[in-house]
Image (cartoon, coloured by chain):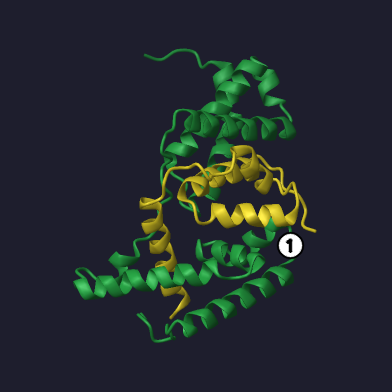
Chain colours: A yellow, B green
């Protein structure tokens, strides 16, 4: 299976899951999404949040808006 | 009807032009919708106008101030949407089924959906650090973006990504999904 096909399959799987997802009860607060964008909090916590964000189309859209606002206005922390 | 240009509006336009372009550039890479960008830019504009009022103050606003305003505006846009229980606009994702053919047969559809579910289960079974990296990668984030988001070095990111992909391929092979499965 090529990486392209892998991405397509995973993408479609997420779309199917999203259609049957029971609302947003398990989604993190927007402030926690911002913490990931700003790299605050523990690495384990950020990885856990990203794990959810990358599988949740609602949180992913919100995360991208925060990330775009953060990066577009020029504040960009240095890497470790 | 034309009138004298409003200096405050012109100052806001000047400050927000580059910001809006950058938001669009960054957002479009991962499917952010134009309406989301417009909402954010309008919110930032309103905040700068209310807080700074004059063209001189708007034009001399520091980068840090613009940054705080932009992030705070984005948070409020999202909080309001959640309060209204709006369904966020979905990120535009490619349609895997459409790419597999114009009119797949029922058997083919079943095979494709089963394959998708197995890929999902294989990703879910990865160890946490590799799973998050693989999910970002499959969502279209490049190595540099992943490294940037996690504050990792490029070698560390590359290592986790390659190990994660190797784990994923191993898990898929154990499920009977080899390199030949639904290949291009």
Label 1: chain letter? B
Q: Which quarter of the picture shows residue B47?
A: top right
Identify the residue position indicated by label 1 in the image. B152
Vertical relation: B184 (above or below) B125: below
Vertical relation: B3 (above or below) B173: above
Q: Which quarter of the picture shows residue B93?
A: bottom left
Can you say which quadrant of the picture contains the C terminus of chain B? bottom left
| Secondary structure of residue under mark 1 | loop
Q: Which residue is drawn at 60% across and 46% down?
A: A67
Q: Which quarter of the picture shows residue B126?
A: bottom right
Can you say which quadrant of the picture contains the N terminus of chain B? top left
Q: Which residue is drawn at 63% across and 59% down?
A: B145
Residue A38 x, y percent position in the rendering: 70, 45
Residue B27 x, y percent position in the rendering: 52, 48
Q: Which residue is drawn at 45% across and 28% down?
A: B84
Depth check: give the residue in front, A72 or A38: A38
Vertical relation: B3 (above or below) B183: above
Q: In this view, does A29 lie to the left or right of B66?
A: left
Residue A15 x, y percent position in the rendering: 39, 57
Label 1 crowd bin: few (<14), some (14–19), many (20+), radius 10 Å: some
In the rendered image, the residue lying farthest to the right is A80
Q: Which residue is drawn at 68% across and 35% down?
A: B67
């Amino acid at each position: 299976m090529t990486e392209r096909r892998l991405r397509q399959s995973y993408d479609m799987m997420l779309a199917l899951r999203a259609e049957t997802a029971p609302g947003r009860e398990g989604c993190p607060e927007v402030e926690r999404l911002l913490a990931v964008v700003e790299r605050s909090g523990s690495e384990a916590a950020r990885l856990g949040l990203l794990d959810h964000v990358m599988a949740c189309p609602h949180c992913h859209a919100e995360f991208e808006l925060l990330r775009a606002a953060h990066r577009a206005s020029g504040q960009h922390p240095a890497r470790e | 009807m034309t009138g004298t240009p409003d200096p405050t509006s012109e100052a806001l336009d000047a400050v927000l032009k580059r910001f809006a372009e950058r938001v669009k550039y960054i957002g479009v890479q991962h499917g952010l919708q134009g309406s989301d960008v417009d909402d954010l830019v309008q919110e930032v504009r309103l905040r700068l106008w209310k807080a700074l009022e004059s063209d001189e103050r708007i034009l001399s606003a520091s980068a840090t101030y613009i940054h705080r305003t932009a992030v705070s505006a984005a948070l409020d846009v999202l909080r309001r949407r959640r309060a209204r229980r709006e369904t966020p606009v979905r990120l535009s994702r490619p349609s895997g089924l459409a790419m597999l053919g114009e009119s797949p047969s029922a058997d083919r559809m079943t095979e494709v959906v089963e394959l998708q579910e197995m890929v999902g289960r294989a990703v879910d079974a990865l160890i946490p650090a590799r799973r998050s990296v693989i999910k970002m990668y499959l969502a279209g984030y490049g190595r540099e973006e992943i490294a940037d988001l996690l504050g990792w070095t490029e070698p560390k990111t590359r290592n986790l990504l390659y190990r994660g992909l190797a784990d994923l391929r191993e898990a898929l092979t154990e499920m009977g999904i080899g390199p030949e499965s639904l290949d291009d």
